[in-house]
Amino acid sequence: MSQVAGKGGQKKSIIPKPLNEVEGKDATRTHTGIGELDRVLGGGLVKGSLVLVGGEPGIGKSTLILQLCDKMQGEGKVLYVSGEESAEQIKIRADRLRNS
């Protein structure tokens, strides 16, 4: 058993359950406009979720995420977090994509 903070900061006990006893809920998904990405994400992005994109350097992770950010304009706020590139590198790539 573990404890986590619930609403209002109150501690709430969590008891582990077998996965077959957990009720699954369908999440509303937002299509990204990038078909293959939607397929990999199970139909699109889930509001409030986090997606971790990993892979070898130079395979296009930043380019893909910047394209996704561009397509998602107007759908809500997007936070781009990178542990691999500086803000300046991301800005240069975004400007290049915008002008291509």
Image (cartoon, rainbow, N blue to C red):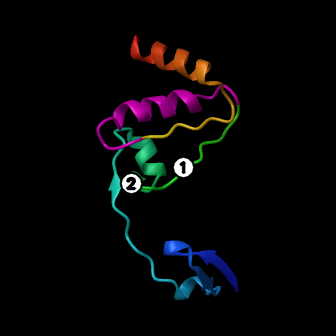
Neighbour tally class for label 2: few under 14, some 14-19, many 20 plus, Cα within 10 Å = some
- Residue 43, labelled with which disc? 2
Q: Nearer the viewer, mark 2 or mark 1?
A: 1
- SS for dot 2: loop
The quadrant of the picture occupied by the N terminus is: bottom right
On the rendered structure, is 31 left or right of 78? left
Q: Residue at x 50, y 34 (%)?
A: 65
Question: x%, y% of residue 92?
Answer: 54, 15
The residue that mark 1 highlights is 51
Q: Label 2 to label 1, Cα distance in Å? A: 13 Å
On the rendered structure, is 27 left or right of 93? left
Tell me, yes or no, whether the highlighted magenta stretch contains residue 55.
no
Q: Is residue 90 above or below residue 71?
A: above
Using the image as rendered, state which of residue 77 and residue 6 is in the foreground. 6
Question: x%, y% of residue 82?
Answer: 62, 35
Question: x%, y% of residue 23?
Answer: 46, 82
- Disc 2 or 1, which lies upstream in sequence? 2
Q: Residue at x 48, y 20 (%)?
A: 94
Magenta stretch? 57-77
Question: x%, y% of residue 3?
Answer: 66, 80
- SS for dot 1: loop
Neighbour tally class for label 1: few under 14, some 14-19, many 20 plus, Cα within 10 Å = few
- Residue 59, labelled with which disc? none
